[in-house]
Image: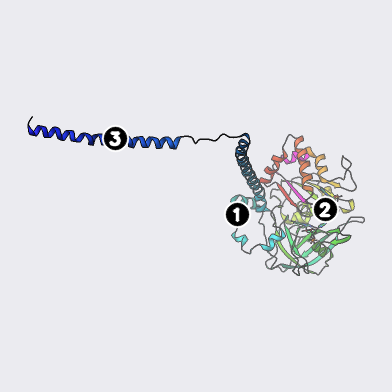
Amino acid sequence: MAYSEARVIAGGLAHIPIIIGIFWFINSYFNKRRNNFEKVNKPAKQKPISNSKVKVAEKPSIKKVENKVNEVKKVENKVNEVKKVENKVNEVKPKLNSSPPLSSEIETVSPNRKENTKIDQKTLNKMKHADVPVNTYRPKTPFTGTVKENYSLLKEGAIGRVNHITFDLSGGDPFLNYVEGQSIGIMAEGEDSNGKPHKLRLYSIASTRHGDNFEGNTVSLCVRQLQYEKDGQTINGVCSTYLCDIKPGDKVKITGPVGKEMLLPDDEEANIVMLATGTGIAPMRAYLRRMFEPSEREKNNWNFRGKAWLFMGAPKSANLLYEEDLQRYLVKYPDNFKYTKAISREQQNSKGGRMYIQDRVTESANELFNMIEDEKTHIYLCGLKGMEPGIDEAMTKAAQEKGLNWAELRPQLRKAGRWHVETY
Ligand code: FAD
Ligand code: A2P
């Protein structure tokens, strides 16, 4: 063996421990990783669990589930609340667009609100039938009218006090124009218990735009004095007492006009169903004058040819308001005017209780719903707020008899601008 060959072999042998070392290093590295991996994934050794501990261990998880369920329920409730609010908003939306603001709202209204309010096209179209003035006079700068007339509308033996009051609007700049179905605000003289001027109260206008004298310079109201007993004392309403007591020549602060909820349709062939209790007849009196009062018809250029049906609720015959005028209209327009009375303390309903207008609605269900099915028919409700549930119930029954669902029909009528309500 040559020297050089011996060197090569010796060199090769010298590498063997190095190669063995490398293999050992790699092997031990992978063993270490495997051990670590097993350690991490091995289930922890569990101590034996006693029964009592099982209960303790289970309780929190059930509670957690219960809590989760409760949370979900809470969220569901919130969602339902939001839905309710949405429904309310949808119900109120058309009212907001059309109903008169409450006296408190009028007080806080900014002078620019009307100008800044964007009115959607639908509402605008609906309003088009009448050029309706609103808030010509506001509480900070009311118009001062002069009392022309103030007389009782009641007969001997009637309950309470109800007056017809007329104000002269002459000299107003701008003139306080109004149309049938609107209201005005009255600010009673004097101060409230906080030493502040009395807030205004709203009253439905009982005259047509031409006024009772047909000269177009007056406005009339029909006012019941509010009276109730408290702690053995008789309390008189502030503004209604002020109005029933004022005398011709007295000066009165007037605001408005307000309201677009109770306007009459332009259509001369429309049918008008009126449901009124007490002073709720005020706007109806204006409608009926517009329809049937000869001098008014001459003036207004509105040749009403539809059917008008008044349901009137009063406690006694002596409390019936504007009765002579209504009887005149019945004689002159028998085909166009129908008048149904509910005299609560003189007549009885089928159950032996007080006769209310809703009982009369039930009695007339078929004829009334034949009219309502005609899309030319509008229904107006005015007077005591308390009558609304009774009217709803009566309409539900009446609708059922015709196979109709009042809960569905009423919103449709409202949407179509055919269901008009002003109760207080
Ligand atoms: P207030 O002195 O204001 O007293 C009323 C307050 O007395 C109530 O808010 C209540 O707190 C309390 N009260 C009332 N009754 C009782 C009771 N039985 N027990 C205990 N507390 C009680 N009225 C008409 O007469 N004719 C109308 O044409 C007319 N149209 C209206 C139109 C609209 C759009 C509205 C909103 C209201 C209308 N009103 C009408 C009602 C009118 O606005 C007044 O609310 C009413 O005259 C009473 O005002 P007041 O200042 O005399 O009574
Ligand atoms: P009553 O007072 O006999 O119970 P006025 O405003 O002149 O008092 O008239 C209101 C009329 O409305 C009265 O005949 C009154 O009857 C009646 N009325 C009272 N409550 C209701 C009601 N919930 N639904 C319908 N009519 C009612």
**Up/down of 396 relative to 109, above or below:** above
Q: Amino acid at mark 3?
A: Trp
Q: Where is the C terminus found, in terms of image quarters?
A: bottom right
Q: What is the distance, in whole Å, between disc 1 and disc 3 at their CAs?
A: 89 Å
Q: What is the distance, in whole Å, between disc 2 and disc 1 at their CAs?
A: 34 Å
Q: Residue at x 35, y 34 (%)?
A: 31
Q: Mark 2 touching mark 1, by CB under 8 A?
A: no
Query: Badge 2 is on which residue?
Result: 278
Q: Amino acid at mark 1?
A: Ile
Tell me the crowding category of disc 2: few under 14, some 14 to 19, or many 20 or more residues within 10 angstroms, Cα based: many
Q: What is the distance, in whole Å, between disc 2 and disc 3 at their CAs?
A: 110 Å
Is residue 374 visible in the rendered image? The answer is no
Q: Of residues 309 and 68, which is closer to you in this image?
A: 68
Q: Residue at x 83, y 42 (%)?
A: 359
Which circle, 2 or 3, is nearer the viewer? 3
Mark 2 or 1, nearer chain start = 1
Query: Badge 3 is on which residue?
Result: 24
Q: Is mark 2 within 8 Å of ligand 2?
A: yes
Tell me the crowding category of disc 3: few under 14, some 14 to 19, or many 20 or more residues within 10 angstroms, Cα based: few
Point out the stretch of residues depicted in magenta. Answer: 367-382
Q: Residue at x 45, y 35 (%)?
A: 41
For residue 415, side relative to residue 353 (left or right): left
Residue 381, magenta (yes or no): yes
Q: Residue at x 77, y 47 (%)?
A: 388
Mark 1 or 3, nearer chain start = 3
Q: Mark 2 touching mark 3, by CB under 8 A?
A: no
Query: Badge 1 is on which residue?
Result: 119
